[in-house]
Image (spheres, rainbow, N blue to C red):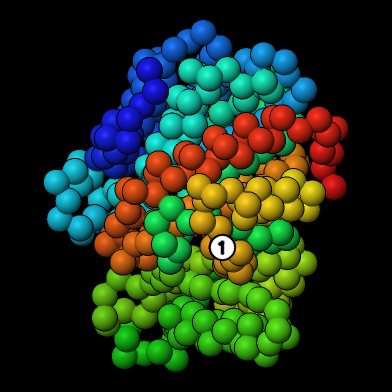
Amino acid sequence: MVLSSDKLIQIRRHLHQIPELAMNEFQTSDYLRQVINSFSQQYLEIGSIPDLPTAILVRVNGSNPKRNIGYRCDMDALPVDENNGLSYASKNPHVMHACGHDIHMTVALGILNYFSEHQPSDNLIFFFQPAEESESGGKVAFDKDAFSGRFHVDEFYGLHDNAQLPAGVIGCRNGTLFAGTTEVNIIITGKSGHAAYPHLANDSIVIAASFIQQVQTIVSRNIAPTKCGVITFGKIDGGVIRNVIAGTTRLEGTIRGLTQTMIEFIRQRITEIASGLQKSFNCQITVEFNQGGYFPVENNPQLTKRFINFMKENPEVTFQETEPKMTGEDFGYLLNKIPGTMFWLGVDSPGALHSADFLPKESAIAKGIVAMTSFLEYRMNLEDEKCSKM
Ligand SMILES: CC(=O)N[C@@H](CCC[C@H](N)C(=O)O)C(=O)O
């Protein structure tokens, strides 16, 4: 049975109420399996990935397969307190689908549902991926050889919702769509002491203040104004009480660049600044970097040109060419290994992604499904060779 728009919205609202953090998407995964099991099983094979228990792979067997086409969606949510007053608000305290992965999953289910009823000519591989916001579920899956054998993927597609685009609009560009990111932790160890005797201590908060100031000059003074780089420290944790000098301060941040070279340059400058401060303040500074799978999302030129042309010419789709964004996505890792295209689905939200008032318009779901099912039908009818990576 093909799912109606109302049923899809009901599914999305259920997913919205059970958001879970990266690698803990157990309720979500159970519910997705329940929905997938309710589809016609004639062409479907459902698989799992060892040691990645919440991941789901579904193969739709094609009638005359020339290639295996992958479609990926992400499943995890964020530690955000929802503030939308919705009747279907999150039931999991302090966790919210504030990045729209509930929309992503519903669109994926809609496409899968369609092809469970209308056998595709190529094989389709659906990947319901845990852990996009952190812990790089896509990379973990790839490194565990998930996309081999029955679930081999020749080319991959995936979408992310976009709060600024009108609901249902498809956005894309050739080249880099999302930045690469790297998580960075700085641990500054000075010496604690009485607030009244600063000369006998080594204040890690003062060193942290200096570090933050200096690091902000990397983008403003070391990077050409025409190039893009971002350094944000979103968390700082130091000290215990007002009248004790803090012996240790920890900073947590994220670095972003549109190329891997830019990310590596920023990493190098952060390391140099930390090493300089270590000497000038006679303290210990540990710098930790973790890129995981958050490579820049680089769309394959050949596949993406075709994707964009199709979307521009399809009367059922409103298409908009977009600029690169400094948000990250671990689909970048999969596109670094397997050619493909990531694109935007407009959801026209008053609140930004990752905010407590993120409120995507549900009318985007049906439009996303129509755009992608019609693209896949068109793509499968092309006789060309498989596209190799680069
Ligand atoms: C779409 C989106 O918001 N993605 C996240 C990806 C997080 C990457 C990693 N945990 C980091 O913080 O560097 C984003 O924050 O852009």
**Is 319 placed above or below 88 here?**
below
Query: Residue 283 or 26: which is nearer the viewer?
Result: 26
Query: Residue 315's spot in the image, x, y percent?
Result: 54, 50
User: Which amino acid, by three-letter code, is at mark 1?
Assistant: Gln
Where 18 sits versus 255, above or below? above
In-front residue for pair 141/72: 72
**In the rendered image, the vertical position of residue 146 relative to residue 190, given as above or below:** above
Q: Position of residue 352 (x, y in %)?
A: 37, 65
**Furthest residue in direction top, as rendered:** 42
Q: Residue at x 48, y 10 (%)?
A: 41
Q: Which residue is mark 1?
A: 320
Foreground residue, 10 or 297?
Answer: 10
Name the residue at 69% across, 73% down.
Answer: 266
Where, by quadrant of the figure, is residue 123 drawn?
Answer: top right
User: For this view, does 232 lie left or right of residue 299?
Assistant: left
Circle 1 — which element?
strand
Quadrant location of the N terminus in the rendered image: top left
Neighbours of disc 1 within 10 Å: few (<14), some (14-19), many (20+): some
Classify residue 237 by image quadrant. Answer: bottom left
In percent of the image, x 75 and y 25: which residue is there?
67
- Identify the residue at image location x=72%, y=15%: 64
Residue 212 shows in the view = yes
Which quarter of the figure has residue 175? bottom right
The percent coordinates of residue 18 (x first, y second) are 28, 37
> How many numbered marks have been drawn onto this rendered protein structure?
1
Instruction: Say whether residue 134 is visible.
Output: no
